[in-house]
Image: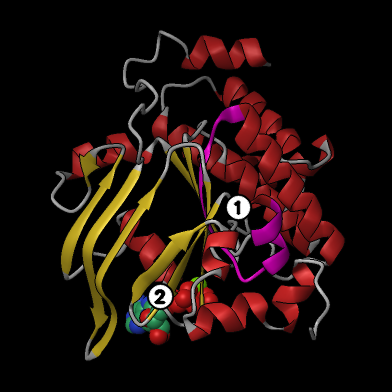
Amino acid sequence: MNTIVNEIFGEEKPERHERFQGEYPVRVRGLVNSFGDQVIHEDLDLDVKRGEILGVVGGSGTGKSVLMRSIIGLQQPDAGHIEVFGQSMTDAEPDEALGVRNRWGVLFQGGALFSTLTVGENVEVPITQFYPELDAEIAHEIARYKVVMSGLPEEATSKFPSELSGGMKKRAGLARALAIDPELLFLDEPTAGLDPIGASAFDELLRGLKETLGLTVFLITHDLDTLFAICDRVAVLADKKVIAVGTIPELLEMDHPWIQEYFNGPRGRAAQGKPIDG
Ligand SMILES: Nc1ncnc2c1ncn2[C@@H]1O[C@H](COP(=O)(O)OP(=O)(O)OP(=O)(O)O)[C@@H](O)[C@H]1O
Ligand SMILES: [Mg+2]
């Protein structure tokens, strides 16, 4: 299967980009987002480093999903500048933006698989969208390969989303996000609703994919275990901004009340294997 993938996505793909070699695949400066009178982001800055898993945390409603949607061009910001792979997303022509779009994969909060398509067909959607000339049989093959790579049994390829468990749906969503060999992966709450074993299996899978594929991952999560287990750095959203970015030990040094409460509250201490009181 690898050889097929290489044949298709190798030299013969003119639009295929060189992998991004810069330090920051994502740069956000002075981002402002609002809905009516409600200001969500105000002068927000964030850099995502190449090859890292960046955890993004913040209370519910602080604008994590809106931030992700802004970066991938689904939410037009009121002001600010966003660059992905060194290319401006905020003043790009639609065509240029498309060239960048086929270099990332997205798993939305809630999964959002197409319910009338099988898992395999779901994974084929981005493949045929970006490579319409591709032979149908090869698109099926690639889809099957991504399904297995995401830790699902091969038989799941022909199942409908309604026939899958919650954890299997997440994996199917991951398979679709990986469909076009992205360099950059956006995941919004990928382990929400999974049992702890399922969630830690997902963490392991993600870490393995990051290491073997050299992915950069923007990972929104409330899951403290995930943060401690696989994130290289964590960005904290509060007060309409990214108030801190760093490794967890660096964040633990900060005396912002939300950060202390989050990482050193009972659940944070448990995730670190520390006693709850003391
Ligand atoms: N399309 C929209 N129209 C109006 N308001 C919106 C829209 N999308 C998001 N919002 C508002 O923006 C705020 C931030 O939403 P967002 O979904 O980014 O939160 P979040 O940090 O992802 O929260 P959660 O952790 O619960 O997923 C919320 O108050 C939400 O109601
Ligand atoms: Mg959200």
Observer-side mark, 2 or 1, equals 1
Which kind of residue does numbered mark 1 sit on?
Cys
User: Residue 184 location, x and y as percent?
Assistant: 46, 40
Q: Which region of the structure is painted magenta?
A: 213-229
The correct choice, above or below, for 187 with respect to 217 in the image is below
At 78% from the left and 41% from the top, the residue drawn is: 151
Q: Residue furthest right?
A: 197
Which kind of residue does numbered mark 2 sit on?
Gly
Q: Within 8 Å: ligand 1 and the Cβ of disc 2?
A: yes
Name the quadrant containing residue 73: bottom left
Task: Name which of mark 2 and mark 1 comes first in the sequence.
Answer: 2
**The label number, if any, that marks residue 231 in the structure image:** 1
Quadrant of the image where one finds ligand 1: bottom left
The correct choice, above or below, for 28 with respect to 153 in the image is below
Q: Residue furthest bottom?
A: 37
At 63% from the left and 74% from the top, the residue drawn is: 263
Residue carrying label 2: 63
